[in-house]
Structures are given as C-alpha cells and as structure tokens.
Amino acid sequence: MGFLLGLPVLVLVLIGIVAFVIHFLPTLVAHNRQVKNFWWIFLINFFFGWTLIGWVVALVWALNDRPRYVFR
C-alpha cells in the first residue's frame, strides 16, 4: 500500500471524502428539504463555501428556506 505524508493513501482518500461531504453539507440539506432556492444555495456553497462565513450563510439559508412542497 502506498504512503503519502506518512499516511496510507486510503486514509487520505477517506479524509477527502469526509471533507467533501462536510463542505457540501448546506447543499445536501437544501436538496433533502427541497427548498425553493436550491440553486442559489448551491452556488453560494460552491463559490464561497471554503470561507467559514459563506458556508454558514449557505447552511442557515438551507435550514430556513421554505420547502418547495408542503405535505399535509
């Protein structure tokens, strides 16, 4: 098994996958809630999610936006 920076490559790949999921957590929340402004949240998360402020803004927006459909 190959090593990179003293860690097995598999561990680095798993860390990368976890980081990717955490980075796009606001987009995943918006998608699961089927919010109206999904694409705007995605764009903010994509372009500004690497900053903590952009990530928090996208997450708060995803949690507070109204769902597209209301099930009764």
Image (spheres, rainbow, N blue to C red):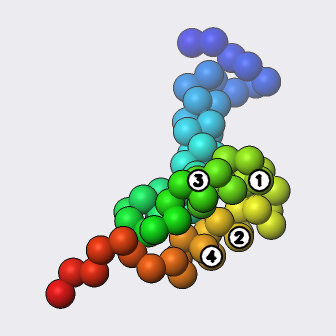
Separation of marks 1 and 4 at Cα, in angstroms = 14 Å
Left or right: 44 as drawn, with respect to 62 = right
Q: Residue furthest bottom?
A: 72
Q: Residue at x 63, y 12 (%)?
A: 2
Separation of marks 3 and 4 at Cα, in angstroms = 13 Å
Residue 64, quarter of picture: bottom right
The residue labelled by disc 1 is: 48
Where the N terminus falls, by quadrant? top right
Q: Where is residue 6 drawn, in percent x and y?
A: 76, 24
Asked if the residues shown at circle 1 and circle 2 are in contact, with their CB atoms under 8 angstroms apart, the answer is: yes
Q: Amino acid at mark 4?
A: Val
Q: Earlier in the sequence, mark 3 or mark 2?
A: 3
The residue labelled by disc 4 is: 60
Neighbor class of circle 3 (other Cα within 10 Å; few <14, some 14-19, many 20+) is many
Q: Residue furthest top?
A: 2
The residue tagged with tag 1: helix, strand or loop? Answer: helix
Say which mark, if any, is on residue 42: 3
The residue labelled by disc 2 is: 57
Separation of marks 3 and 1 at Cα, in angstroms = 10 Å
Q: Residue at x 45, y 79 (%)?
A: 66
Q: Earlier in the sequence, mark 1 or mark 2?
A: 1
Q: Where is residue 55 drawn, in percent x and y?
A: 71, 62
Q: Amino acid at mark 2?
A: Val
